[in-house]
């Protein structure tokens, strides 16, 4: 592993614990056994380091999506099962740091759409919608209604995640997800939420 990769991984762990928006190079460098000068040399600037951390976080996000995506024919699981699997992962306490980082980066991307944060929120929306589309039967996936259903599923997951991060009330928020899944039409686990 190169020194740059080592420092990126150490920075990522630091950011998961301390957040990204108020990142300062001096305390970061001291915590990870480096210097601000080395970090700037390796990443070009503080902004370059933030971009690298956001890319690293996106790698984790895509790994989650791949974990949820079934092998074989993904459309066989349906949207409801995809939502159940995603929520089970999202609601697990050990994932809170990465999800807090996601929420922080998502919000920052909305208020600062240019520069370092630019495109982060939109890219995550597209990633998640693509996964949800893969889980829909082809005839549903390609319809306006199918697009609306997966958009609703993503909105419910995102809202529930923000609620869970804010309150820690796993039981209440999971009950809301379960309630939304119960509203789906069609046979169990075959249709969208």
Image: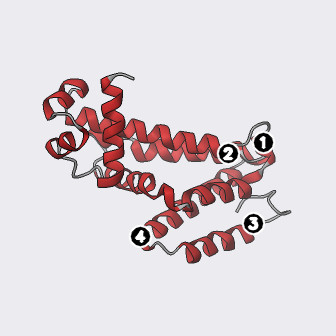
Of callouts 4 and 3, which one flags the residue occurring earlier in the amino acid sequence? 4
Horizontal and vertical percent position of residue 193: 70, 63
Q: Earlier in the sequence, mark 4 or mark 1?
A: 1
Q: Which type of secondary structure does the marked residue at label 3 adopt? A: loop
Say if mark 2 contacts mark 3, CB within 8 Å.
Answer: no
Residue 173, above or below 127: below
Please state if 103 lies on the left or on the right of 75 as rendered. left
Q: Secondary structure at mark 4?
A: helix
Q: Which mark is residue 111?
A: none
Q: Residue furthest bottom?
A: 172
Q: Percent x, y for residue 60?
A: 49, 41
Q: CA distance from mark 4 to mark 3?
A: 27 Å
Q: Nearer the viewer, residue 56 or 180?
A: 56
Q: CA distance from mark 2 to mark 3?
A: 16 Å
Local packing at callout 3 (Cα closer than 10 Å; few below 14, some 14-19, many 20+) is: some
What's the CA distance linking mark 3 and mark 1?
18 Å
Q: Earlier in the sequence, mark 2 or mark 3?
A: 2
Disc 4 crowd rating (10 Å Cα; few below 14, some 14-19, many 20+) is: few
Q: Secondary structure at mark 1?
A: helix
Q: Which residue is mark 4?
A: 166
Q: Nearer the viewer, mark 2 or mark 4?
A: 4
Q: Earlier in the sequence, mark 2 or mark 1?
A: 2
Task: Determine the residue positioned at 40% across, 36% down.
Answer: 55
Q: Residue furthest top?
A: 2
Asked whether the residues under the numbered discs 2 and 4 touch, taking CB atoms below 8 Å apart as contact, a structural biologist would say no
Label 4 – label 1 distance at C-alpha:
36 Å
Q: Residue at x 49, y 55 (%)?
A: 95
Q: What label does residue 133 carry, if any?
A: 2
Q: Which residue is disc 3 drawn over?
A: 184
Q: Secondary structure under badge 2?
A: helix
């Amino acid at each position: 592993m190169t020194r740059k990769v080592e420092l990126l991984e150490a920075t990522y762990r630091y950011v998961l614990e301390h957040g990204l928006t108020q990142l300062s190079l001096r305390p970061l460098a001291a915590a990870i056994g480096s210097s601000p000068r080395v970090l700037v040399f390796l990443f070009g600037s503080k902004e370059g380091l933030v971009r690298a951390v956001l890319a690293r976080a996106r790698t984790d996000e895509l790994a989650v999506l791949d974990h949820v995506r079934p092998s074989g024919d993904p459309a066989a699981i349906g949207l409801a099962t995809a939502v159940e699997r995603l929520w089970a992962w999202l609601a697990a306490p050990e994932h809170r740091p990465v999800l807090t980082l996601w929420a922080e980066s998502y919000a920052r991307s909305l208020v600062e759409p240019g520069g370092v944060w630019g495109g982060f929120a939109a890219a995550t929306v597209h990633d998640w919608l693509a996964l949800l589309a893969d889980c829909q039967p082809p005839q549903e996936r390609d319809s306006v209604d199918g697009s609306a259903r997966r958009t609703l599923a993503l909105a419910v997951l995102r809202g529930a995640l923000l609620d869970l991060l804010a309150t820690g009330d796993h039981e209440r928020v999971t009950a809301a997800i379960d309630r939304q899944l119960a509203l789906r039409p069609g046979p169990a686990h075959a249709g969208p939420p």
